[in-house]
Image: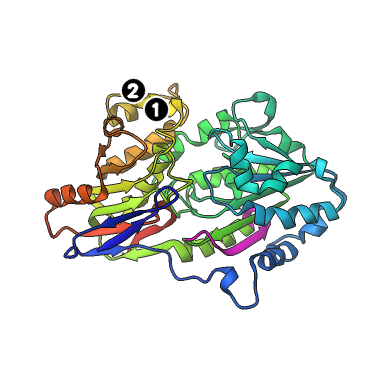
Amino acid sequence: MEIHLDYGKSGLLVRLPDHLNVRTLTYQSATPIADQPNRTDREALQEVLNNPTNAPPLSEIVQGRSSACIVICDITRPVPNQLILEPLLEVLHTGGIEPEKVKILIATGLHRPSHPNEIVEMVGEEIAQKYTIINHDAQDRRQLVFLGKSPRGIPMWINTHYMEAEMKITVGLIEPHFMAGFSGGRKLICPGIAGLETIRAWHSPKFLEHPLATTGQLEGNPVHSENSWIANRAGCNFIVNVIIDAHRRPLKFVAGDQQSAFQQGADFCRNIVVDQVEHPFDIVVTSSAGYPLDTTFYQSVKGMMAAVPIVKQGGTIIIAASMSEGIGSPEFASLFQRHPSIDDFMEAIMSPDYFVMDQWQLEMLAKVLRKADVRVVTDGLSAETIDSLYVKSSESVEAAVHHALSVHGENASIAVIPRGPYVIPELIN
C-alpha cells in the first residue's frame, strides 16, 4: 500500500503493509475554477470585484481616495497573490490612486520578515519591482499606532502604514486554523499587522485554553471573536480571499465586506475540507501540508493538532515535515531549554508575568501531548534535536508505524491525513 504525504516541495511516498486497514482523510470533491466551463480564474476574480459581498464594487469604493495599503500573507500561506493583485491594482489605478501611493504590507505577525527572493515568489517580479513592499514588524513601535483596548482588555497596536492609508485592503487565504477556526479575513489584521503586545494578549492562555478555540470553530471561539473585533476597530474597506484545493488551484474567490465575505468563504471552505469518520483511531499519520507550511518544527505543530480530534486517548500521532529552516524562532527554541518538561512549561505560563515570544505554539503542542504520543519524521533536524522537543524521532514513517503497531497491536486502526492541517477531521456523533 502506498500513500503520498505533502512534504517539503516534492512530497513523501510511504509504503505500508497491505494487510493494514487504513482510512485516508481528504478534501471533498470540488472542481477548480479553471476547469469549470467557460470560466477562468481571472474572470471569477473579476466577478467578485464587481459584485462583492455586502459592499459596493471596488471601483466605486476607491473613488476619491488618494492612497492605499494592501495587506498580503507572508510566505507561510500559499496565496496566489500575483493573480489577485494584478486586477486589484488595476482597479486602484483606474480609480485615481497612483502606483507610488500604494503600499503592499506583508502580514508577518511575529514571523520572520520575508526575504527579497520570497517576495518575488509571492507577488511576481513586476509587482515586486514596481511597488513599495514592507515587512510588518510587530516589535517596532515606530510602525505602530495605538487604538485603545478591546472589550476583553487587549491593547490594540496596529501597523501605521495601514492605518494611515485612505484605502485599506486585505488579501488572504481561507483555510482551517488550529486556534482561530479558519485563517483569512480578520487574521490579516490581527495578528498579521498587529503589535507584539496585542498578539501576546490575544495568544494568552485566557484565549487558547478555551475549549472552542480550535480548528474549524468560529461560533463561541474567543480567539475568532476577539480578533474580529480588533480588525473591525482598525477598519477595512475591502477584502479579497481565496479558497484553494489540494493542488493549490483556486476553488472560489470571495470579496467585499470584511465580516460577510469572510463568513461566506469560511462556510464554503468547511464544506470542502471536512472529512468525517465514525470512530477514533489508534494511529494517525499526518503531515504539515508541505512547503511553505512545514519549514519549521514550530509550524509542524499545526499538523499535529490536525490529528487530535480523531486519535484515541493514548494513541500515536506520526507526522512528517521537512523542517528545512529548523525549530523556529530563537525564542521558541529557547523554551525547550528553559523547561525540562511540557508540564513544567504549562505551569509556568499560567503566571501572568510569564512571557516568551511564540510560547503559544508550545501551548498548542501541550494539547497534542495530553492526547497522544508523537513521532516525528524529518530531514531537517537531527534525531537528537527532535528528541529534545518533547516528542520522539523516527527515521521513517514506515518505522514509526511499525513501532506504533508494536504498542497498539497488529490490528490497530490507522488514519492518514496526507495534507495535515488543511483537512478538518470530524467524528460522527
Tell me if I can see residue 343 in this picture.
Answer: yes
**Residue type, numbered disc 1:** Ala
Q: Nearer the viewer, residue 51 or 297?
A: 297
Q: Indicate the position of residue 137 as horizontal and vertical percent values.
A: 62, 30
Counting other residues with Cα less than 10 Å from the Cα at mark 1, is it few (<14), some (14-19), or many (20 or more)? some
Q: Of all residues shown, which one is farthest toward the bottom? A: 37
**Residue type, numbered disc 2:** Gln
317 versus 195 height, above or below: below
Q: Indicate the position of residue 234 as horizontal and vertical percent values.
A: 68, 41
Q: Indicate the position of residue 292 as horizontal and vertical percent values.
A: 49, 46
- Is residue 295 shown in magenta? no
- Is residue 249 shown in magenta? yes
The residues tagged by marks 1 and 2 sit, at their Cα atoms, a distance apart of 7 Å
Left or right side of 54 for 350: left
Q: Secondary structure at mark 1?
A: helix
390 versus 414 height, above or below: above
Provide the residue designation for mark 1: 333
Left or right side of 56 for 362: left
Residue 337 got which mark?
A: 2
Q: Nearer the viewer, residue 230 or 141?
A: 141
Q: Residue at x 39, y 27 (%)?
A: 333
Indicate the colouring scheme: rainbow
Q: Residue at x 41, y 33 (%)?
A: 326
Q: Nearer the viewer, residue 226 or 66?
A: 66
